[in-house]
Image: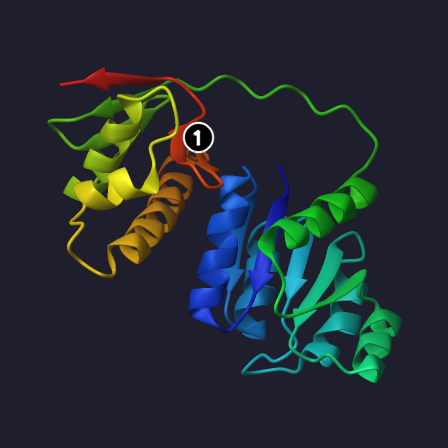
Amino acid sequence: MTQILIVEDNGDYAADMAEFLLGLDHQVEVATSAGEMWAALTRNPHAVVVLDLGLPDEDGFNVIPRMRQLYPEIGLLVLTGRVAFDSRILGLRLGADHYLTKPIKFPELAAHIEALDRRMRPHSQEPSPAVSKWTLKVTARQLEVMGVSIDLTEKECNFLHLLTMNTRPVPRQVIVARMGGEDPDASRRVDMLVYRLRKKARLGLGQDLPLRSAYGEGYSLSAGFYLAS
């Protein structure tokens, strides 16, 4: 699991990227400007930053050397539409560890992130995390872990309830049908629901939701859930 900060002003693209990386059990935060990025770096530790160069408030080429000075331990991966050879050379010379250009397939991006994190991570044995017990309270529409709970919307509760009732990944088309299959935007609504649910769990419960995105199959839970009425 890698702590990743995505710095990208295209909200839809950032959400899709975050959703894919969250499905690989990474911790992901999104910033849409350089200002948000600096605030996020001050607020939380991150192992890898995925940086778009075309930010609304500061050019990425100005960000790179400053980040190298302030956070030398962070892995810096540039992901940009600037494909010119001179831009690539400049980005690497300023301090980027990787310089990738759009469009890129997210599995390839994830491989670069994981390789970079392995190289940047101290060679020490991490302690095994404590096993968390998750409880879904269907009637109250609440999700609880380690004595802390958050309120869920009806769709969020129904989504988690559906996953708890299946030991294998639930196909996307089944989830879409449960959420209103006649809506042409239903598939997109599922993605946004998952993104918001992960964020709600991280902020409200202090833990990552044990939810896996099985590529080409659907969604499943990677930990056992207790059901309560």
- Residue 170 falls in which quadrant of the image? top left
Q: Is mark 1 on a helix, strand or loop?
A: loop
Q: Position of residue 27 (x, y in %)?
A: 54, 43
| Residue at x-position 43% and y-position 21% | 223
Q: In this view, does 176 lie above or below 54?
A: above
Would you place residue 167 above or below residue 218 in this image? Answer: above
Which residue, given by chain and number where applicable, does mark 1 sit on?
Answer: 210
The three-letter code of the residue at mark 1 reads Pro
Q: Which residue lies at the image location 23% right of the left edge and 28% below the top edge? A: 161
45 vs 175, left or right, is right
Q: Dot 1, crowdedness within 10 Å: few (<14), some or many (≥20)? A: some
Residue 136 visible in the snapshot: yes
Q: Is residue 82 above or below residue 97?
A: below
Q: In this view, does 196 lie above or below 63?
A: above
| Residue 84 in picture, x, y percent from top left | 77, 83
Of the 4 image quadrants, the one containing the N terminus is top right
Task: Pick the quarter of the image with the C terminus.
Answer: top left
Q: Can you see residue 153?
A: no
Residue 127 lies, in percent from the top left, at 67, 21
User: Which residue sits at x=67%, y=52%?
Assistant: 108
Camera-nearest residue between 121 and 162: 162
Image location of residue 139, percent across then percent down: 11, 27
Kindly identify the residue that appears in the image at 19 percent across and 35 percent down. 158
